[in-house]
């Protein structure tokens, strides 16, 4: 593979990566805790989009439980979003990555 071909592939990959990053905002994942009493929805760039709380938890006595469940639900949603984003990026970038020895680690995080 010549240098010009590699440079062309790298520019193509850069354009695809920019497009992929924009798509990550569209990926959504939901996590729940407390058997669904608290749900959180996040996107592929790890922004919290929505938190739902069952009305039964909205009492002063349940404040600490609610806080713990919110953290747990958000963490589950973040993990799912990360997995979906990685899967999307690997699928999108697989064919555009030039075959340069030593750079295969980029697609195998």
Image (spheres, rainbow, N blue to C red):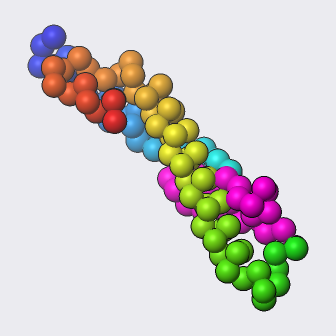
Q: In terms of image quadrants, where is residue 14?
A: top left
Range of magenta residues: 31-55
- Percent x, y of residue 34: 75, 61
Whether 33 is among the magenta residues is: yes
The image shows residue 86, relative to residue 53, as above or below, that is above
Magenta stretch, main secondary structure class: strand
Residue name at image x 50 percent, y 45 percent: 82
Whether 28 is among the magenta residues is: no
The image shows residue 95, relative to residue 64, as above or below, that is above
- Percent x, y of residue 62: 77, 81
* Front residue of 72 and 10: 72
The image shows a total of numbered marks equal to 0
Q: Is 1 on the left-hand or right-hand side of 36?
A: left
The image shows residue 14, relative to residue 73, as above or below, that is above
Q: Determine if residue 25 is in view.
A: no
Residue name at image x 15 percent, y 20 percent: 101
Q: Is 13 on the left-hand or right-hand side of 26?
A: left
Residue name at image x 51 percent, y 33 percent: 88
Q: Residue furthest left?
A: 3
Q: Residue furthest top?
A: 1
Residue name at image x 33 percent, y 29 percent: 107
* Front residue of 24 and 59: 59
Q: Residue furthest bottom?
A: 60
Q: Determine if residue 53 is in view.
A: yes
Which image quadrant: the N terminus? top left
* Front residue of 21 and 47: 47
- Percent x, y of residue 86: 46, 37
Which image quadrant: the C terminus? top left
């Amino acid at each position: 593979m010549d240098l010009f071909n590699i440079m062309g592939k790298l520019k193509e990959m850069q354009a695809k990566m920019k497009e992929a990053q924009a798509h990550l905002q569209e990926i959504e994942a939901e996590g729940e805790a407390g058997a669904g009493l608290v749900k959180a929805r996040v996107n592929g760039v790890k922004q919290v989009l929505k938190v739902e709380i069952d009305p039964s938890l909205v009492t002063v006595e349940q404040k600490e439980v609610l806080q713990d469940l919110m953290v747990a639900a958000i963490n589950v949603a973040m993990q799912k979003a990360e997995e979906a984003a990685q899967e999307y990026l690997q699928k999108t970038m697989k064919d555009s990555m030039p075959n340069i020895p030593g750079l295969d680690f980029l697609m195998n995080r």
